[in-house]
Amino acid sequence: MSDQLCQICHGVFHRETHKRSYRARTCRHKFATPGSDCWFKKGGLPRLVAESLLQPKPRTEAATDRRNRLLHDLGEASATSEPLARQYLARLSPHDRWSLIQFSAPGLRYWLLTAYRDDELSAIPNLAPVHYPDLPEPLLERLKDWEDKNRRRLTARINNGYTRAPDTLRRKMAEPIALARFLADRGIERWETMTISDRIAFAKTRPKLVQQKLKAFITFIEGGNPFKTRRGRPPKRAKKVIRETRQTPILPPDELKARLREAKQRLPADQYLLYWLVAKLGLTAKAAYSLTLDRITINAQARLVIRPAEAWFSLPKSLAPTMEALARAADPAWPYEDPDKAPAIPVMEDVIPRHRVGPDIFLGETTLLRSSAIHAAMHYGQLDRKTLAAITGVSLKTISDMEFLVPADIHSLVSHDLVAARNQAILGED
């Protein structure tokens, strides 16, 4: 037998004299024997850390190094005592505590959530780093200034209780970086020398919807404040007799029911739950996918309720078991006594990857399905604006625009003879 340094607990384990034993990197290999200091043999919390280190590595080398550092430090502290491990957690930043949850196996994740709850420790997702191409220094310098400005603003929002996806900053920087690369290819090395012709040429290469994301950055490099608050009384505008409204694409209620039936046959139960939250309840796909445990609970009537916006909403009994299974998989200690103090752990991430939600579940019709769900609710009598907004998070402006579509559909709720008699009275033919 030969001794080898374990990549998990950094202790010594023994390898058998076998021609394939050189492949053993940890004591979990079939041709290896654990040493005296093995975390698996110690059991308890060290074993949970070791099981987490056995999971597949993250995609990037930086994330792998971060995972190994956090878990190894926690493992060394837990090998001494659990109170020392809790002291180590208290010294970490909220972002590192969140990373530990992401890197942990189910057993360690449950222990971490319990420790965070008992010691009142916060865990906040960190913003993903921004990667820059090879650019001239003057262009790169202003890009980094814009990144710092947005990072400070997003961090302040997160610290005030708002939820932001880890890739939010990276998405905000995508278009400014694309513009800088376009200018560099044209031989422009400073933002001050960019002309309107350059901006028009760049705009022709991008979709119109994407161009809107550059307005704040252009204001920034021109010396303005893109985040200026416009407080006070707005200026008076000339009143118009006729108000133009944009036609909202919707599906008739009967066709929407058919889509729901088709989705129930096509999708597994957990993915159909996502579909139902958008196509029936009227949530955005982002709000449905971002549901967290602090917005899911069991009420006094033993019904499972969710709070995607401002108000709690009771799920149908046919869907409640699916949501309950997802919640308990995220944290076996759910439901909590006080959801407001519960950790914001997402429950939909294991259902389907985020980038596949739109193509695979909604078949590219997310906006159409959501608008149709809101219209169907109004068609069947839910005309209270505040209730709709509190449950679905839809803006009052959208509700106001869609109310113009409801009166025409109300005809289907009365007999055709009554509609014909009313039309004759209006035209003076009765």
Image (cartoon, helix red, strand yellow):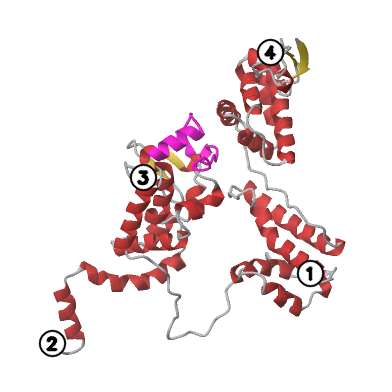
Callout 4 environment at 10 Å: few (<14), some (14 to 19), or many (20+)? some
Q: CA distance from mark 2 to mark 3?
A: 49 Å
**Horizontal and vertical percent position of residue 19:** 72, 17
**Res 336 visible:** no
Q: CA distance from mark 1 to mark 2?
A: 71 Å
The three-letter amino acid code for the residue at tag 4 is Pro
Q: CA distance from mark 4 to mark 3?
A: 49 Å
Q: In the drawing, what numbered circle is on residue 183?
A: 1
Callout 2 environment at 10 Å: few (<14), some (14 to 19), or many (20+)? few
**Residue in view at x 49 percent, y 39 percent:** 293
Q: Which residue is mark 4?
A: 34
Q: Which residue is mark 3?
A: 315
**Residue in view at x 67 percent, y 38 percent:** 58
- SS label for mark 1: helix
* N-terminal label among 2 and 4: 4
The three-letter amino acid code for the residue at tag 2 is Asp
Q: Which residue is mark 2?
A: 430
Quarter residue 371 falls in: bottom left
**Residue in view at x 36 percent, y 42 percent:** 319
In this rendering, position of residue 253 left or right of residue 18? left
Q: CA distance from mark 4 to mark 1?
A: 58 Å
Question: Disc 4 or disc 3, which is closer to the eye?
Answer: 4
